[in-house]
Image (cartoon, rainbow, N blue to C red):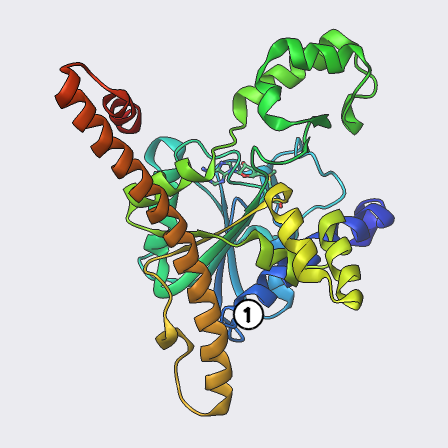
Amino acid sequence: MDAQRFDERETIVTCQEQRRAIDGHLRFLEWLGKPLQPGARVLDFGCGIGQAVEILLNMGYDVHGVDVVDWWRRDDYWDKSYLPQARVTERLQCLDESNYRIPFPDGHFEFCFSDQVMEHVRDHALVFGEIMRVLKSDAVSVHRFPGPNMLMEGHLFVPFPVLCYYKPYLAMWAILGRRSPDQRALTWRQTLASNVEFMGKVNYPRKTRLRRYAAKAGVEIAFLEKQELLLRDFGNAGRLVSRARRLGLDRLLAGVLAPFAQRYMVLARRALGPGDAGGSGDRCNARATQSNRARGHFLQDKAKMSKRGVLLRSWLACSSLLKGATGCGGLGSHIGVKERS
Ligand SMILES: C[S@@+](CC[C@H](N)C(=O)[O-])C[C@H]1O[C@@H](n2cnc3c(N)ncnc32)[C@H](O)[C@@H]1O
């Protein structure tokens, strides 16, 4: 990176953050029993201006980036501390939102990741389907992004993202003087207008909804926030968990913090199984164990879903019995309509 073109201190922070995020993904793949091989083809989905692409390129991977905006050709990207070089920009491609297609053949990549992108996506089912199409059949993609569970809306610096869709709530914080770093010079009215506009572009789907989109796209989905917290050492939650390791309390703390942490969503074409570790011998047995653990998580995630499914089905059955007995629409019929919508 050309240090003379921007403030060096800022660049170090930016690159370090991106570097840590990437290290976290690579560690996660190892834990999953699917370590990335040298030179592997990697896709940075929602690559922004391309910092992560440069980092992975320097690590020797055959990495490409896609985004719906060609930030690398414009001068309005929010992080002005980094300008990508030609060897990076030639690996970045802009996607056409009206004819959405990732410009690579089927089964091209060994790994795909995104950081802080899924909360900006409009059509998740379409995106999930496209990501799976360009991935090899046994590959996975991982996506870190904020959800409605977070304690703070990280773009606006206002607490509780779910409440940020309400204008009076945003107005209250703007009047109280709450500003993001780039809003410091704005009046409360200007802050409110910019926050309302921003919330119109960002969406925080619940996990149930993301699971529905994945089912629509025919894709396996799992949320592994606790495991991701145990493997990363950045961010407030990640740092706390790695400090708690010395006291042997990391798993407990990760479990407590995971519901409030960023989502860590894993997509795969099929549920992972012991065969995913591949090969034979001790090393592979160790990998198979890791893979089994991962599989356990995937299945656990699915088991939670099916428990809910059983509850819902029992409720529907009771309700239709009631309906039969009373001759009027019961609770179940109401739920049935809601589920279909
Ligand atoms: C907050 S930025 C994150 C950029 C980069 N991943 C990073 O960590 O610096 C979100 C990016 O997602 C891109 N994006 C939003 N919707 C997208 C979509 N459907 N497909 C690809 N990129 C998308 C945006 O244009 C933007 O560059």
Let me know if residue 142 appears in the view.
Answer: yes
Q: Is residue 100 left or right of residue 333?
A: right
Reply above or below: 39 against 145. below
What residue is shown with label 1? 31
Q: Position of residue 270 (x, y in %)?
A: 32, 60
Position of the N terminus by quadrant: bottom right
Let me know if residue 1 appears in the view.
Answer: no
The residue at the point 31 percent across, 58 percent down is: 106
Q: Position of residue 99 (x, y in %)?
A: 33, 35
Q: Residue furthest front?
A: 325
Q: Is residue 309 left or right of residue 60?
A: left
**Badge 1 amino acid:** Trp
Q: Is residue 183 left or right of residue 306?
A: right
Helix, strand or loop status at disc 1: helix
- Does the closest atom of ligand 1 sit within 8 Å of the Cβ of label 1? no
The residue at the point 59 percent across, 38 percent down is: 71
Q: Position of residue 107 (x, y in %)?
A: 33, 62
The residue at the point 79 percent across, 20 percent down is: 178
Front in this rendered view, residue 8 or 324: 324
Quadrant in the rendering for residue 72: top right
Q: Position of residue 308 (x, y in %)?
A: 36, 42
The residue at the point 59 percent across, 55 percent down is: 226
